[in-house]
Amino acid sequence: MAMSWSRGAGVASSLVVGAAVLLLAAPNATASTWGDVTLEKSNPQAGCSYKVTSGDLVGGGSSSVNGAKVTFFDDGAVIGSGTVGGGLLGNPAKVTWTPKTAGQHVLTASSEYLGGGSGFELTPLTVQVRESSSTGSFGCPLPSISG
């Protein structure tokens, strides 16, 4: 009998360890392999405009993502869309985002493969937007000269 209980306990402990490993790995299981949504500046302010890009999804050369249209969203509402690629080194897809309200915003992006097929999603970006300054657009950070 003791042999049977010992074997059962070993199987049970293996199952517990296996479940713990799966739980620890689960947050990374949904991470995108396509890259991240990125924001040009930190600490955004309501009423100011910021560049949102497809991060390291840049295309270029003979990349299979050249010409892919990427649609960007703020809490599920469409911000706009941009195209990946262009040039030998490529460029990320870009849009201009002007948050209307202060608080937490989740920026997401998705696209379809050229020629159809299942699409892809970029890893979302959660940002905290601060209140608008009393000086209006004069309180907004200056845009980048590099584009």
Image: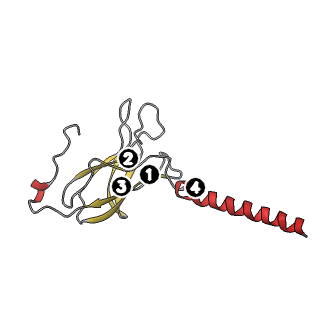
Point 10% across, 59% down: residue: 136
Q: CA distance from mark 4 to mark 2?
A: 25 Å
Label 2 crowd bin: few (<14), some (14–19), many (20+), radius 10 Å: many
Residue at label 4?
25
- 12, above or below 112, in the image: below
Which callout, 4 or 2, points to the residue nearer the camera?
A: 4
Image coords of residue 117 (percent x, y): 53, 51
Q: Which mark, by number, is residue 122? A: 1
Relative side of 68 to 45, left or right: right
Relative placement, left or right, of 47 versus 80 is: left
Name the element at disc 3.
Answer: strand
- Image quarter in which the C terminus is found: top left
Determine contact: label 2, label 1, CB under 8 Å: yes
Point out which mark residue 72 bears: 3
Give the residue type at disc 1: Leu
Q: CA distance from mark 2 to mark 3?
A: 9 Å
Q: Of discs 4 and 3, which sits in the foreground?
A: 4
Of 87 and 137, nearer the camera is: 137
Q: Give the x, y percent position of residue 58.
A: 40, 39
Q: Residues within 10 Å of mark 3 (few under 14, many from 20)?
A: many
User: How much space separates mark 4 and mark 1, taking CA atoms?
Assistant: 19 Å
Q: Residue at x 27, y 51 (%)?
A: 42
Disc 4, disc 2: CB below 8 Å? no
Q: CA distance from mark 2 to mark 1?
A: 7 Å
The picture quadrant where one finds residue 83 is top left
**The furthest residue to the right:** 1
Residue underneath mark 2: 54
Q: Residues within 10 Å of mark 4 (few under 14, many from 20)?
A: few
Nearer the N terminus, badge 4 or badge 1?
4
